[in-house]
């Protein structure tokens, strides 16, 4: 068995039939197959050659996994499941096959119009879309080579940043959101990696229950409904409910790569995976593209690219444990939008608990080197029928700044008011609808 494994070509995938045939040998000799190496399991204890714990080189491809671990196709499954569970405890980057990549033109079709233009690599996405069936195999080999070597081509790490206006003063750079336009092949590659990462994280229930950002089955709607249900429940119990809407300054651009790699390591990512992600962040450059002009390149040493596929998932991993600092208060995370809230019959107790939890959350963000934007962080007291105090106790930041109390606030696209009447939100919708109906009437065919 060892002799056979040592003769394998590392660039050639075994067929499913061959893998299944070897499965019986594996079970008989207690071998756990690795690329050009072997691993022995005896009564649940793993041991082997010095290079055996090279998890990213585990020699079972995607199609082979589907056959081996399918109870309808493999009679040896009850025995194999023992070492499959061992494998699942470690996250590895599986090497794909051409069939998986042949459908990547669907990804290109889903891109918005501004992503269909030629990137810094001068490779038109339309070319990849039209030639997907032909180029899938060499592209797959290129992706697999990246997994094996833990390196990403430098050209794939160059981004053109488009400033997206968020509102406010058009001359203020802080009123623009930087969107990174990455090479098309890079985005296709990231989509493959992101699928594996998210599947691993979700299957192991890594994400906090109060983390809704960029997760399947979660979104702005589910996050807003959860928060509103908690607040309305408190109001129905004739309790005070106070909330802090936390705004972070340049959250995505402030991610510390060393801290993030540490987080991935604590989640069971193998050394080869960590090496790949370390290389993913290394030597990144960006330039600004505006009105057809392109600035010079600038090295990027922090942050996850906004506009990338992996960026949102990695940011969610980065801030996931912040929820643990909420204490007696409730919290909900959606990307860099965080709401901290608590309720109770006594207003003084509510505000005291909120201040304690807010202090802990600030310390947690500081540990991640994420800075609070105090001017945009707001407080709100939800109350319909209870006596309103003449003056509310201030909620303060760790720097001693008092947060502003507001009666309305836009949270995840919904305008909330202190009585939850939604009148402000309805008026905004009416105004938007009138504007669009007016546009249709002005431009209707004569």
Image (spheres, grey):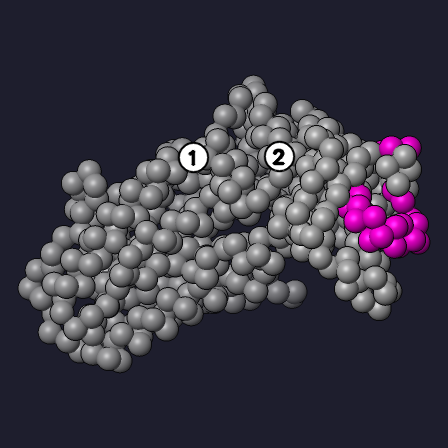
Residue 68 in the image, given as x and y percentages of width and height: 82, 57
Please give the residue where the numbered disc 2 appears in the rendered image: 271
Front one among 93 and 47: 47
Can residue 418 be seen in the rendering of this structure? Answer: yes
Q: What residue is pinned by disc 1?
A: 254
Give whichever of 424, 61 is nearer the camera.
61
Q: Residues within 10 Å of mark 2 (few under 14, many from 20)?
A: some
> Which residue is outermost to the left?
390
Residue 284 vertical placement versus 23 (above, below): above
Q: Nearer the viewer, mark 1 or mark 2?
A: 2
Q: Looking at the image, which residue is at 77% across and 46% down?
A: 32
Q: Quadrant of the C terminus?
A: bottom right
What is the secondary structure assignment of the residue under circle 2? helix
Percent position of residue 178, x then y: 50, 37
Task: Identify the image quadrant of residue 347.
Answer: bottom left
Which residue shows up at 47% across the image and 43% down it?
A: 318
Relative side of 306 to 337, left or right: right
The single residue placed furthest to the top in the displayed view is: 296
Task: Please check the rendered image and state whether residue 7 is part of the magenta-colored stretch, yes or no.
Answer: yes
User: Where's residue 124, x and y in %?
Assistant: 76, 36
Judged left or right of residue 223, residue 366 is: left
In the image, taking residue 262 as reference, residue 378 lies left or right, namely left
Q: Splitting the image into 4 quarters, where does residue 364 fall?
A: top left
**Left or right of 52 on screen, residue 244:** left
Please tell me whether residue 380 belongs to the stretch shown in magenta: no
Magenta region, residue range: 6-34
Residue 272 in the image: x percent, y percent?
Answer: 65, 34
SS at badge 1: helix
Label 1 crowd bin: few (<14), some (14–19), many (20+), radius 10 Å: some
Residue at horizontal 49 percent and vertical 32 percent from the top: 257
């Amino acid at each position: 068995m060892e002799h056979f494994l040592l003769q394998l070509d590392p660039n050639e995938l075994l067929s499913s039939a061959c893998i299944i045939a070897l499965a019986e040998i594996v079970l008989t000799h207690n071998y756990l197959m690795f690329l050009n190496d072997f691993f022995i399991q005896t009564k649940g204890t793993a041991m082997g050659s010095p290079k055996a714990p090279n998890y990213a080189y585990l020699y079972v491809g995607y199609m082979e996994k589907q056959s081996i671990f399918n109870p309808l196709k493999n009679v040896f499954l009850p025995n194999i499941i023992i070492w499959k569970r061992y494998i699942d405890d470690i996250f590895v980057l599986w090497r794909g096959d051409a069939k998986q990549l042949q459908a990547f033109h669907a990804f290109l079709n889903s891109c918005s119009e501004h992503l269909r233009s030629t990137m810094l690599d001068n490779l038109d996405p339309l070319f990849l879309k039209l030639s997907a069936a032909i180029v899938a195999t060499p592209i797959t080999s290129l992706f697999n080579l990246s997994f094996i070597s833990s390196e990403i081509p430098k050209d794939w790490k160059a981004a053109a940043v488009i400033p997206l206006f968020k509102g406010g003063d058009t001359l203020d750079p802080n009123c623009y959101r930087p969107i990174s336009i990455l090479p098309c092949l890079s985005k296709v590659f990231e989509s493959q990696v992101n699928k594996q990462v998210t599947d691993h994280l979700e299957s192991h229930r890594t994400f906090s229950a109060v983390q809704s950002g960029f997760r399947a089955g979660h979104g702005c709607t589910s996050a807003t409904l959860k928060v509103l249900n908690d607040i309305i429940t408190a109001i129905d119990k004739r309790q005070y409910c106070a909330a802090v809407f936390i705004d972070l300054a340049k959250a995505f651009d402030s991610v510390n790569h060393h801290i993030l790699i540490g987080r991935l390591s604590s989640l069971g990512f193998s050394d080869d995976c960590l090496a790949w992600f370390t290389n993913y962040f290394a030597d990144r450059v960006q330039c600004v593209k505006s009105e057809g002009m392109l600035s010079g390149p600038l090295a990027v040493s922090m942050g996850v690219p906004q506009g990338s596929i992996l960026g949102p998932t990695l940011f969610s991993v980065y801030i996931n444990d912040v929820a643990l600092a909420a204490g007696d208060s409730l919290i909900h995370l959606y990307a860099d939008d965080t709401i901290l809230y608590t309720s109770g019959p006594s207003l003084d107790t509510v505000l005291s608990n909120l201040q304690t939890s807010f202090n802990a959350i600030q310390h947690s963000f500081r540990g991640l080197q994420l800075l609070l934007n105090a001017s945009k962080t707001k407080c709100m007291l939800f109350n319909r029928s209870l006596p309103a105090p003449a003056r509310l106790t201030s909620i303060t930041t760790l720097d001693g700044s008092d947060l502003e109390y507001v009666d309305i606030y836009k949270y995840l696209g919904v305008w909330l008011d202190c009585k939850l009447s939604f009148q402000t939100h309805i008026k905004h919708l009416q105004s938007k609808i009138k504007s669009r109906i007016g546009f249709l009437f002005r431009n209707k065919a004569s």
